[in-house]
């Protein structure tokens, strides 16, 4: 469970095999009908619908979304951008975080500990748009002292969080 979950009474350790099977199937195909999901998991449709509703209400399922082919939507260049700040005031952190998540091409933004303060995953149309994104949206913030950019050659999904540790 994340700290933002709706129901802190349901820890992730409380998920049983059926819940985990439902979650794994939905992560693979979030458009799966309840009937197909129930058949795949091996439970009655009513049981499946109840379980999915409970997982949503508890906050375990926070959303279901589409994964886009970034090249097909005109954003074939991906990069990871590390951002270093001179000031760690709450105002600067919150202001920059809000700016970065609204930035065009922003796929994910992480506020991190360590030598850098933010890690961004972005997708853009061209190397020139990557340059412009950094110059117009990141380095213009007064607390930003340095950015480091790495081009992404390939991304593969990981095993996820449902398996044993």
Image (spheres, rainbow, N blue to C red):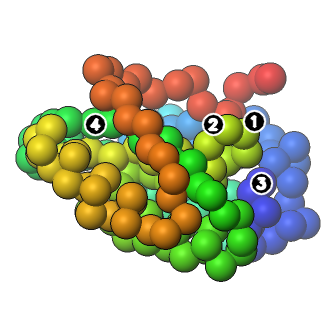
Separation of disc 2 and disc 3 at Cα? 17 Å
Separation of disc 2 and disc 1 at Cα? 6 Å
Residue at point 35% right, 55% down? Answer: 106
Q: Can you tell which quarter of the image residue 160 is in?
A: top right
Between marks 2 and 4 in the image, the one whose residue lies nearer the viewer? 4
**Which type of secondary structure does the marked residue at label 3 adopt?**
loop
Question: Which residue occupies the foreground of this view, 159 or 71?
Answer: 71
Q: Earlier along the polypeptide chain: callout 2 or callout 3?
A: 3
Q: Can you tell which quarter of the image residue 162 is in?
A: top right
Q: Position of residue 21 (x, y in %)?
A: 63, 37
Query: Is 127 positioned to the left or the right of 97 in the image?
Result: left
Residue at point 87% right, 48% down? Answer: 14
Residue at point 43% right, 63% down? Answer: 100
Question: Which residue occupies the foreground of this view, 26 or 103?
Answer: 103
The reply to whether dot 3 and dot 4 touch (C-beta < 8 Å) is: no
Identify the residue under disc 2: 21
Identify the residue under disc 3: 1
Q: Earlier along the polypeptide chain: callout 1 or callout 4?
A: 1
Say which quadrant the N terminus sits in.
Answer: bottom right
Q: Position of residue 146 (x, y in %)?
A: 48, 46
The reply to whether dot 3 and dot 1 touch (C-beta < 8 Å) is: no
Q: Can you tell which quarter of the image residue 154 is in?
A: top left
- Disc 3 crowd, CA 10 A, few/some/many (<14, 14-19, 20+): some
139 is higher (above) or lower (below) than 67: below
20 is higher (above) or lower (below) than 60: above
Identify the residue under disc 4: 78
Q: Earlier along the polypeptide chain: callout 2 or callout 4?
A: 2
Between marks 3 and 1 in the image, the one whose residue lies nearer the viewer? 3
Query: Is 128 positioned to the left or the right of 143 in the image?
Result: left
Between marks 1 and 4 in the image, the one whose residue lies nearer the viewer? 4
Question: Which residue occupies the foreground of this view, 104 or 137?
Answer: 137
* Tag of residue 17: 1
């Amino acid at each position: 469970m994340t700290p933002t979950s709706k129901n802190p009474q349901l820890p992730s350790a409380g998920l049983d095999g059926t819940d985990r099977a439902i979650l794994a199937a939905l992560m693979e195909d979030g458009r799966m009908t309840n009937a197909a999901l129930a058949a795949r998991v091996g439970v009655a449709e009513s049981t499946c619908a109840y379980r999915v509703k409970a997982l949503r209400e508890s906050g375990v399922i926070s959303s279901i979304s589409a994964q886009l082919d970034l090249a097909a939507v005109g954003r074939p260049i991906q990069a990871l951008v590390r951002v270093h700040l001179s000031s760690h005031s709450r105002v600067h952190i919150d202001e920059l975080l809000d700016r970065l998540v609204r930035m065009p091409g922003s796929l994910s933004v992480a506020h991190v500990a360590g030598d850098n303060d933010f890690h961004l995953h972005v997708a853009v149309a061209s190397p020139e748009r990557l340059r412009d994104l950094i110059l117009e949206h990141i380095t213009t913030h007064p607390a930003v002292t340095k950015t480091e950019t790495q081009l992404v050659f390939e991304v593969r999904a990981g095993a996820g969080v449902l398996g044993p540790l």
